[in-house]
Image (tube, rainbow, N blue to C red):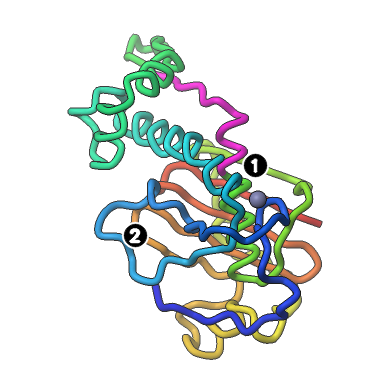
Amino acid sequence: MRKVPNFGDDRQKGFCVHCGGPAQTKDHAPSKVFLDMPHPQHMPTLPSCSKCNNGFSDDEEYLASFVECVICGTTDPTQLQRDKVRKALKRNGKLRKRIENSKREGETANGERLLTWCPEDNRVQSVVLKLARCHAAYELNEPQLHEPALINVFPLLTLNPNQLQQFETPPDTGGWPEVGSRSLERIAFDGVSIEVGGWLVVQKGRYRFLAAGAGSVIIRGVLSEYLGYEVIWD
Ligand SMILES: [Zn+2]
């Protein structure tokens, strides 16, 4: 990713993007646990208080690991593809057990083995909300400290073709971003390659998102091309 300076309104900067507290540390968005090595250059960072910055890491490790286990159909570290998750589950037996316990084995009508996994919704939602708050602050210069109107998290393969198309198509907000916000800089510099509200690919196959503002703020993202989310603030 190219580093794009934020020339937006200064009143929107200088505080923790999660709780409005002091800007004591820098928080990566997305967190590195969702990406593989080598990391992209110029990863966006957001001001964060120490409490918020540390508070998410267990849930982030859980979600990254959970998604990888679902994709690979196992919690056995030797059978996982992502190196970071392999290491995490080798190191953290408790986490592996917790994910293993959320696995349900059944059979399809044809007698084929069917695995379903039940995520811990509160942890998933907390991570998704964190990601969305970071993208809203960084991309749109519109920090969202209040609760969103909607948080939706779903495996992409549970969407029907219409729902999928709707999800993939940037919303038409009918508006223009604030002068100086990163979205506007990107249109100016990148021309048609990245449009307002278009998807930004942080690491191919691992993480992409879109941020659209004007009236409401809409953030969508996809982890490992498996798990989609949408967060909306009115
Ligand atoms: Zn905070």
At horizontal 72% and vertical 71% (from top left) the residue drawn is: 12
Location of residue 98 with respect to 128 vertically, above or below? above
Give the number of the disc on residue 173.
Answer: none
Closer to the camera in the image, 174 or 33: 33
Q: Counting other residues with Cα less than 10 Å from the Cα at mark 2, is it few (<14), some (14-19), or many (20 or more)?
A: few
Residue 163 visible somewhere in the drawing? no
Q: Quadrant of residue 218?
A: bottom right
Which quadrant of the figure contains the N terminus? Answer: bottom left
Q: Position of residue 9 (x, y in %)?
A: 72, 80
Closer to the camera in the image, 22 or 190: 22
Q: Secondary structure at mark 2?
A: loop
The stretch of residues the image draws in magenta is 115-127
Location of residue 33 with respect to 154 vertically, above or below? below
Which quadrant of the figure contains the C terminus? Answer: bottom right
Q: Position of residue 59 (x, y in %)?
A: 50, 35
- Left or right of residue 18, residue 188 in this image: left
Q: Position of residue 221 (x, y in %)?
A: 53, 53
At horizontal 43% and vertical 13% (from top left) the residue drawn is: 101
The amino acid on which the numbered mark 1 sits, given as a three-letter code, is: Asn
Give the number of the disc on residue 152.
Answer: 1
Q: Position of residue 16 (x, y in %)?
A: 65, 58
**Magenta highlight on residue 88:** no
At horizontal 41% and vertical 63% (from top left) the residue drawn is: 202
Q: Quadrant of residue 116?
A: top left
At horizontal 49% and vertical 88% (from top left) the residue drawn is: 191
Location of residue 232 with respect to 90 vertically, above or below? below
Q: Secondary structure at mark 1?
A: strand
Residue occupied by mark 2: 204
The amino acid on which the numbered mark 2 sits, given as a three-letter code, is: Lys
